Image (cartoon, helix red, strand yellow):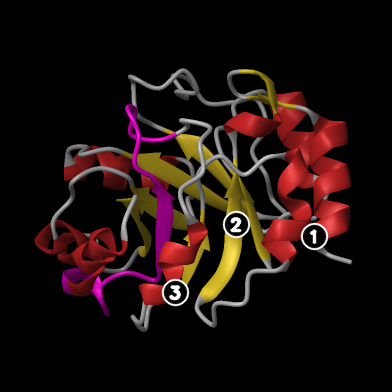
Amino acid sequence: MMIKVCGMRDAENIREVEAMGIDLMGFIFWPKSSRYVSERPAYLPTKCKRVGVFVDEDIEKVRHIADDYALDYIQLHGHESPEYCVLLKGHKLIKAFNIATKEDLEATKPYEGLVDYFLFDTKGKSVGGNGEKFDWTVLEAYQGNTPFLLSGGIGPDDAERVKAINHPKCIGIDLNSRFETAPAIKDVNKLKEFIKTVRI
């Protein structure tokens, strides 16, 4: 199972989390987020893939940041259209969808074949980082071809539930706010214990 830790910003915290052997690390380039990366961290990961998270951003700015940070993936967390995704051809893409009911999964269909992964997050007040889970049984209705990451309120107590997921297209999980001591600062011990349990 792939593990993505999102909302990173502090250089030392980045080093500590990277050392756990995670697969993806997310950096949020949305100014309204409390985890917004306003300036380049003194250290960026080299052992895991870098993911830049954008929300309805100007496409040229996305390209510029992707080059500047040597991003491996661009995560689109807003209302970006399939046409927008086509314009980013050449970049690996993750498209996020806010899910509450199985009907919400219908929104993925126009993006089939245009992105590498979907990310299913909880439909909440904020674009992301709400710290709340949605009903994971809804995912049984997903029959698309695109693999997905599960996000939304996964916390330290959810390791066994995560291990029990058996959807053929679920390739990983996204961890963020429930593992924080402050915005953009992850609790290293809680993360380490969780990851160890999930990967047993």
Residue visible at 52% across and 26% down?
40
Q: Position of residue 185 (x, y in %)?
A: 68, 23
- Pointer 2 with pointer 3, Cβ within 8 A: no
Figure quadrant of residue 157: top right
Alpha-carbon distance for marks 2 and 3?
16 Å
Mark 3 vs 1, N-terminal side: 3
Q: Position of residue 68 (x, y in %)?
A: 43, 40
The residue sitting at 40% across, 42% down in the picture is 53
Residue in the image at 31% along x and 68% along y: 90
Does the segment drawn in magenta span residue 121?
yes
In the drawing, does residue 61 fall left or right of residue 131?
left
- The three-letter code of the residue at mark 2 reads Ile
* Coordinates of residue 156 in the picture (x, y in percent): 76, 40
Q: Which mark is residue 173?
A: 2
Q: Residues within 10 Å of mark 1 (few under 14, many from 20)?
A: some
Q: Which residue is mark 1?
A: 198
Q: Which residue is drawn at the image coordinates 25% and 42% (left, top)?
A: 78
Residues 17 and 1: in front is 1
